[in-house]
Image (cartoon, rainbow, N blue to C red):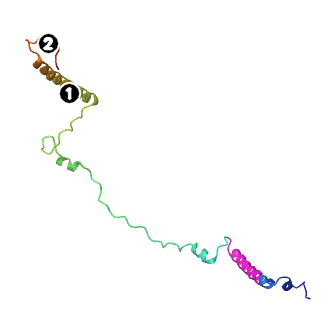
Amino acid sequence: MGDYGNAMMRNQDAGVQSRVKAQSRANLLQLKLIGQSHPTGLTTNLLKLFEPRPPLEHKPPLEKRKLPAYSGMSQFVSRFAEPGDPEYAPPVPTCETRAEKKDRIRQLKLEEGAAKVAEELQKCKLFLKPHCPFRVIYMYC
């Protein structure tokens, strides 16, 4: 009937497979050549991106300008304000310390408490009448 040793007789698509294998083998060889062209295996297009730029142009250093010489302040001391001048500021007032503030607040509270006690005492005296013994015993405050 036929020759079964032939590849086309065993498999109808054998010719197509051999063409694909040959094509993939060519691609593989091309990739190997690319990999052998540079140790990193990068293509030439990518290697161009990593090339160094040309060196910078040398320029001489800038010349320093001549600055005015330093001078002292002694020539301006006569213009300073003195204690007799109107623009002379008085010394800064000192702030109260914690202890002084605590004493001041305590004194204010004592004065407020004394005023409140005196006011309540006045209210109680209005209710006291000498002719009414009931109100003397029971004060309404």
Q: Position of residue 32 (x, y in %)?
A: 72, 76
- Our reading of the magenta stretch's main secondary structure is helix
- Residue 46 location (% of width, % of height): 60, 75
Q: Earlier in the sequence, mark 2 or mark 1?
A: 1
Left or right placement of residue 8 versus residue 113 in this view? right
Residue drawn at x 71%, y 75% as measured from the top left: 36
Q: Amino acid at mark 2?
A: Phe
Residue 101 falls left or right of residue 81: right
The amino acid type, in three-letter code, at marker 1 is Leu
Above or below — where is 16 with respect to 46? below
Is 28 contained in the magenta span? yes
* Residue occupied by mark 1: 108
Q: Which mark is residue 126?
A: none
Quadrant in the rendering for residue 18: bottom right
- The residue drawn where x is 23% and y is 48% is 74
Task: Name the spot of residue 113 as percent of width and height, x first.
Answer: 20, 24
Q: Quadrant of residue 97?
A: top left
In this orientation, which residue lies closer to the viewer: 41 or 82? 41
Camera-side mark, 2 or 1: 2
Residue holding disc 2: 134
Q: Which residues are magenta?
A: 19-39
User: At numbered mark 2, what does the secondary structure look like: helix, strand or loop?
Assistant: helix
